[in-house]
Image (cartoon, rainbow, N blue to C red):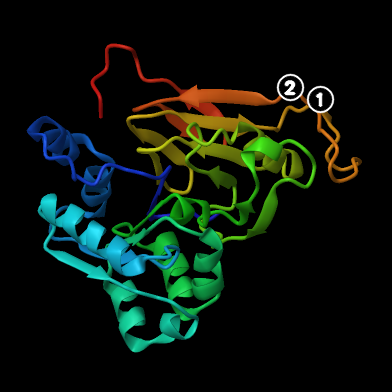
């Protein structure tokens, strides 16, 4: 398997953008927050950061919020790439921005918009190539932007109806990290059943449920470190002893036995290839 050189940072949504006026929270944002980690992994405040708000229904406002947040962190080179069609993904400006970026930051919204308007375009191919081959290239994404990183992407599904066969809709993502299925806003929106059904459909894949203001730094396409203030739930279906997803009719409650679930928090690590957890010692500092 080819070694991946770039870095992925999927985020569970609603990450701190330094909007709180209280100085204490501003200092936490600058020293410890999710976007601080994004900037650090991208090479620091001189990195070329390109924000892509394609998933959002209000891309201009979302782009401005990220411009403000990254400027508060001292970043000097931030561009917003407002892609609203496949044609926008093929412009010379879009191609140059993606070629020269140290970091691509996908916003939240509707993940299907990302794959519909960027999937299989020139800039998507450049992103894939650079992620695989450039050590100084980061792709970060929050909410929809995180979910779109997968190959098997959750496109929809109500938490109240989850774990009824057919409640979860899957769609092709950007295939940046095909070993994972990523779900976001995981705790606040009660998506345990939704992710469980996704893993039942694809038990060879690993489900990742990210709480808000929580993310993972993924190095080499394998080594994951949890960042942020919440928890990350990891679903491993490789040892299932019962999974009736394939034989049930749609609308029928499902059964899974021996599903392995890990609850991880800031600083904990997960090895995708070996499906192994390394837990940060209790006395270790917040990263």
Q: Is residue 232 above or below residue 56?
A: above
Of residues 233 and 274, the one nearer the viewer is: 233
Say whether residue 26 is left or right of residue 259: left
Is residue 17 visible in the rendered image? The answer is yes
Query: Image quadrant for the C terminus?
Result: top left
The location of residue 34, given as percent across then percent down, is 28, 42
Query: In the picture shown, does residue 166 fall above or below 264?
Result: below
Residue 79 locus on image (x, y percent): 23, 70
Where residue 76 sits in the image (x, y, percent)? 11, 63
Of residue 219 and residue 64, the one placed in the foreground of this image is 64
Q: Are marks 1 and 2 in contact (CB under 8 Å)?
A: yes
Badge 2 density bin: few <14, some 14–19, many ≥20, Cα 10 Å? few
Query: What residue is disc 1 on?
Result: 241
> x and y percent of residue 114 in the render?
49, 66
The span from disc 1 to disc 2 (Cα, nearest Å) is 6 Å
Quarter of image, res 145: bottom left
30 above or below 7?
above
Task: Check residue 258 in the rendering and tell me which mark sits there, or answer none.
Answer: 2
Q: Residues within 10 Å of mark 1 (few under 14, many from 20)?
A: few
């Amino acid at each position: 398997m080819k070694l991946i050189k770039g870095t992925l940072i999927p985020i569970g949504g609603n990450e701190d953008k330094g909007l709180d006026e209280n100085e204490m929270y501003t200092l936490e944002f600058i020293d410890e927050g999710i976007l601080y980690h994004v900037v650090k992994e991208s090479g620091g405040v001189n990195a070329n950061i390109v924000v892509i708000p394609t998933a959002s229904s209000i891309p201009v406002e979302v782009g401005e919020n990220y411009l403000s947040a990254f400027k508060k962190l001292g970043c000097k080179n931030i561009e917003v790439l407002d892609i609203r069609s496949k044609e926008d993904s093929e412009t010379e400006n879009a191609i140059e921005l993606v070629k020269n970026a140290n970091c691509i930051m996908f916003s939240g919204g509707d993940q299907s918009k990302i794959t519909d308007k960027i999937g299989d375009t020139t800039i998507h191919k450049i992103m894939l190539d650079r992620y695989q081959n450039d050590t100084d290239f980061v792709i970060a994404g929050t909410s929809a932007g995180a979910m779109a990183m997968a190959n098997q992407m959750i496109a929809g599904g109500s938490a109240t109806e989850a774990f009824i066969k057919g409640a979860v809709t899957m769609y092709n993502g950007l295939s940046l990290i095909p070993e994972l299925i990523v779900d976001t806003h995981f705790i606040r929106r009660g998506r345990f059943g939704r992710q469980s059904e996704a893993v039942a459909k694809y038990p060879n894949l690993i489900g990742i449920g990210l709480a808000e203001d929580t993310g993972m730094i993924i190095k080499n396409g394998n080594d994951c470190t949890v960042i942020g203030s919440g928890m990350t739930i990891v679903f491993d279906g490789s040892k299932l002893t019962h999974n009736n997803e394939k034989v049930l009719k749609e609308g029928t409650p499902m059964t899974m036995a021996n599903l392995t679930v890990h609850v991880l928090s800031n600083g904990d690590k997960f090895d995708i290839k070996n499906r192994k957890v390394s837990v940060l010692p209790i006395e270790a500092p917040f990263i």
